[in-house]
Image: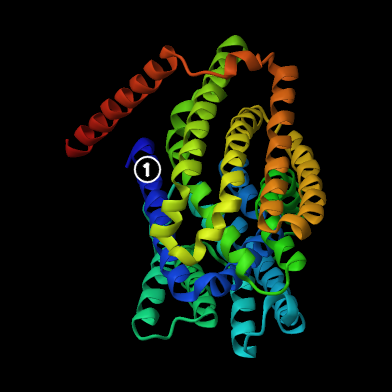
């Protein structure tokens, strides 16, 4: 299978995963209600944030060390597995204690559920290490299968429990954990031949991978923390029930749907950046900025006008209070789309670490504004905090690109005819390449 067809397959798998995630969100929201889905969302957020920070970028660094440094995959895999087991065990023990000792924050759950979910968080470093090595191997079919498995467990498992009237917040948490366990077991099966426990732990290699991983993953970790911090703070600042998180999370989900198209078009817009310099790169960056800004603005206006009906159809009238946050968060996606372009060009130029500092400042702004406004405005205050943080990333990203590349903000405002022609030609070229790949395979 050619690289192009692998890319199309992985993109299709991601789109299916997003769709299944949306369906799962609709199912769990309608059955659990705002309070139940809010608690469920808090546990999901905790898993993602803790696991991402716990792996410390080692999983992403594996791609570089395998493909660029030509380190034997057996050494990388075995070293990574040992690291993940120790780290995961420590995380599981800590999170079990946290869940049981902070019932006022996480809500009361049974001891078995707390232990089971903490163990699911603990296996995520192992999943991350092994999955990223599949990415490095360009194992497209296996990547899609793993993505599909987790989404299927959550959706089908939740649907079966709902049919029998057994879907509760705790059973939903267990189903989510089962998805993590299932995907980890499958990726472990895929990589079993690359694990050789007779190879001693390589401390020198571990230090190199860790150093490189922290450097390249710092911005991604900061971005994740910025996107999820509002949920964490909402629970602390509005502890009466989980409803505020339920409403806020539905608003963020709908806003997240805005970025599906940019994810698909991203490879068309950014593919040539690593191969061009000077004015050619500048023109492409300005084009990407214009298109991202125009698209996100149109979608934000659409969400503001039609968001009430989207909430009602997807989640039910119980979630209509989410609209007060949705109106504000819709514009934060505009800022995030601008930031995404800046981040991509800086990452392509080996300067992604600059955005880590920007994101750190944005997180500080988010915390201060959210802490100040939530007691006054509720979930709208959290949305304003997220908007201020995303605006900071956009403004700083544009300023950095102006200084480094001579970016002209005035040429980034309105889409023009040449931009549309570029996209049309790119799709035409992709179609011709796909047909060529197909013909070659048939021959």
Q: Locate residue 165: give its quadrant.
A: bottom left
- Above or below, 351 relative to 157: above
Q: Residue 137: in sight, yes or no?
A: no
> Picture coordinates of residue 162 (x, y %)?
38, 79
Query: Label 1, on which residue?
Result: 6
Q: Locate residue 48: give its quadrant.
A: bottom right
Pick the front one: 373 or 429: 373
Local crowd size for mark 1, using a 10 Å CA cut-off: few (<14), some (14–19), many (≥20): some
Which residue is depicted at the point 41% across and 75% down? 158
Q: How is the image coloured?
A: rainbow
Q: Residue furthest bottom?
A: 111
> Picture coordinates of residue 74 (x, y %)?
56, 58
Pick the front one: 202 or 369: 369
Q: Locate residue 398: give its quadrant.
A: top right
> Picture coordinates of residue 228 (x, y %)?
66, 56
> Picture coordinates of residue 204 (x, y %)?
77, 54
Label 1: element kind: helix
Which residue is depicted at the point 58% across and 74% down? 120
Tag count in the figure? 1
- Above or below, 394 relative to 110: above
């Amino acid at each position: 299978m050619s690289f192009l067809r692998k890319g199309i397959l992985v993109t299709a798998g991601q789109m299916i995963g997003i769709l299944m995630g949306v369906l799962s969100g609709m199912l769990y929201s309608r059955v659990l209600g705002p309070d139940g889905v809010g608690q469920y969302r808090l546990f999901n957020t905790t898993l993602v944030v803790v696991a991402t920070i716990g792996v410390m970028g080692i999983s992403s660094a594996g791609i570089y060390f395998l493909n660029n440094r030509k380190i034997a995959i057996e050494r990388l895999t075995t070293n990574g597995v040992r690291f993940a087991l120790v780290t995961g065990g420590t995380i599981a023990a800590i999170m079990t204690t946290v869940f049981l000792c902070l019932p006022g924050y996480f809500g009361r759950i049974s001891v078995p559920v707390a232990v089971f979910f903490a163990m699911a968080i603990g296996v995520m470093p192992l999943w991350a290490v092994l999955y990223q090595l599949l990415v490095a191997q360009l194992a497209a079919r296996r990547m899609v299968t793993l993505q599909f498995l987790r989404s299927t467990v959550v959706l089908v498992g939740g649907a079966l429990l709902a049919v029998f009237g057994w879907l509760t917040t705790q059973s939903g948490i267990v189903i989510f954990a089962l998805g993590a366990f299932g995907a980890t077991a499958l990726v472990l099966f895929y990589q079993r031949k690359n694990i050789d426990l007779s190879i001693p732990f390589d401390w020198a290699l571990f230090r190199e991978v860790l150093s490189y991983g922290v450097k390249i993953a710092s911005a991604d970790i900061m971005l994740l923390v910025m996107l999820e911090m509002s949920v964490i703070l909402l629970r602390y600042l509005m502890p009466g029930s989980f409803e505020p998180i339920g409403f806020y999370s539905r608003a963020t989900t709908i806003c997240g749907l805005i970025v599906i198209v940019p994810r698909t078009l991203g490879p068309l817009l950014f593919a040539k950046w690593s191969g061009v310099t000077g004015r050619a790169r500048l023109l492409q960056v300005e084009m990407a900025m214009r298109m991202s800004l125009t698209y996100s603005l149109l979608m934000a206006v659409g969400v503001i006008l039609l968001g009430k009906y989207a909430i009602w159809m997807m989640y039910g009238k119980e979630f209509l209070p989410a609209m007060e946050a949705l109106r504000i968060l819709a514009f934060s996606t505009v800022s995030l789309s601008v930031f995404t372009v800046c981040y991509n060009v800086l990452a392509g130029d080996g300067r992604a670490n600059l955005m880590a500092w920007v994101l750190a400042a944005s997180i500080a702004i988010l915390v201060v504004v959210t802490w100040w406004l939530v007691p006054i405005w509720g979930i709208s205050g959290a949305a304003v905090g997220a908007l201020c943080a995303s605006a900071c990333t956009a403004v700083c990203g544009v300023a950095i690109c102006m200084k480094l590349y001579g970016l002209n903000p005035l040429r980034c405002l309105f889409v023009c005819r040449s931009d549309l022609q570029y996209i049309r030609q790119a799709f035409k070229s992709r179609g011709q390449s796909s047909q060529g790949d197909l013909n070659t395979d048939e021959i």
